[in-house]
């Protein structure tokens, strides 16, 4: 045998079972690292959108800030400084709203409503 024939010899077959195990581990890894957290995030976003009430201050995905004036089946009417606009429920972002207002989005609404009522009375 010459040196060239030794280098060109094929490896023995039989590593197919190990290959299938590695593919299975990769699929399970992708599920726990990518798919499951995304599903959890979508569920939290949907719950947030369903629990919004009239008067809550929100930030939309487009960056628009406003207060919910009316809740409808297919969306919200958002009151801004320039008027009232209708948006889909999916446009309200939990991440932006919590980052901007945090827990004070509900408590400060009551304080601001009282201030508005007092200024209207004067």
Image (tube, rainbow, N blue to C red):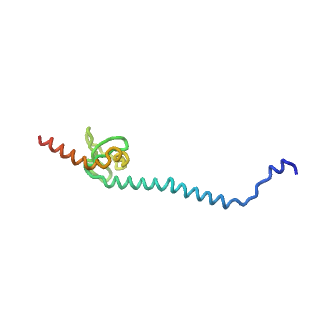
Q: Is residue 115 left or right of residue 27?
A: left
Q: Is 56 placed left or right of 90 in the picture? A: left
Residue that sits furthest to the top in the current view: 82
Residue 19: horizontal and vertical position, in percent?
A: 65, 58
Q: Nearer the viewer, residue 105 or 59?
A: 105
Look at the picture and state if 28 lies above or below 102: below
Residue at screen point 38% across, 52% down: 45
Residue 102 or residue 34, whichever sits in front: 102
Please state if 34 lies on the left or on the right of 76 as rendered: right
Viewport quadrant of the C terminus: top left
Say which quarter of the image contains residue 83: top left
Q: Report x, y in % for residue 63.
A: 35, 41
21 w.r.t. 59: above or below: below
- Give the mark count: 0
Find residue 48 and report its horizontal and vertical position in percent: 35, 53
Q: Could you tell me which residue is drawn at 85 percent across and 48 percent down?
A: 3
Where residue 2 sits: x, y (%)? 87, 49
The outermost residue toward the left is 122
| Residue situated in front as seen by the camera: 79 or 120 | 120
Q: Quadrant of residue 119?
A: top left
Residue placed at 42% from the left, 53% from the top? 41
């Amino acid at each position: 045998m010459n040196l060239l024939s030794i280098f060109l010899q094929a490896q023995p077959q039989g590593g197919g079972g190990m290959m299938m195990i590695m593919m299975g581990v990769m699929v399970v890894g992708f599920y726990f690292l990518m798919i499951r957290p995304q599903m959890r995030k979508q569920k939290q976003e949907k719950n947030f959108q369903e629990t919004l009430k009239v008067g809550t201050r929100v930030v939309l995905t487009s960056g628009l800030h406003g207060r919910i004036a009316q809740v409808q089946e297919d969306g919200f009417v958002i009151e801004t400084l320039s008027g009232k606009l209708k948006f889909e429920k999916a446009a309200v972002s939990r991440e932006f709203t919590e980052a901007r207002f945090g827990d004070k989005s509900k408590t400060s609404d009551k304080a601001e409503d009282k201030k508005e009522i007092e200024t209207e009375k004067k």
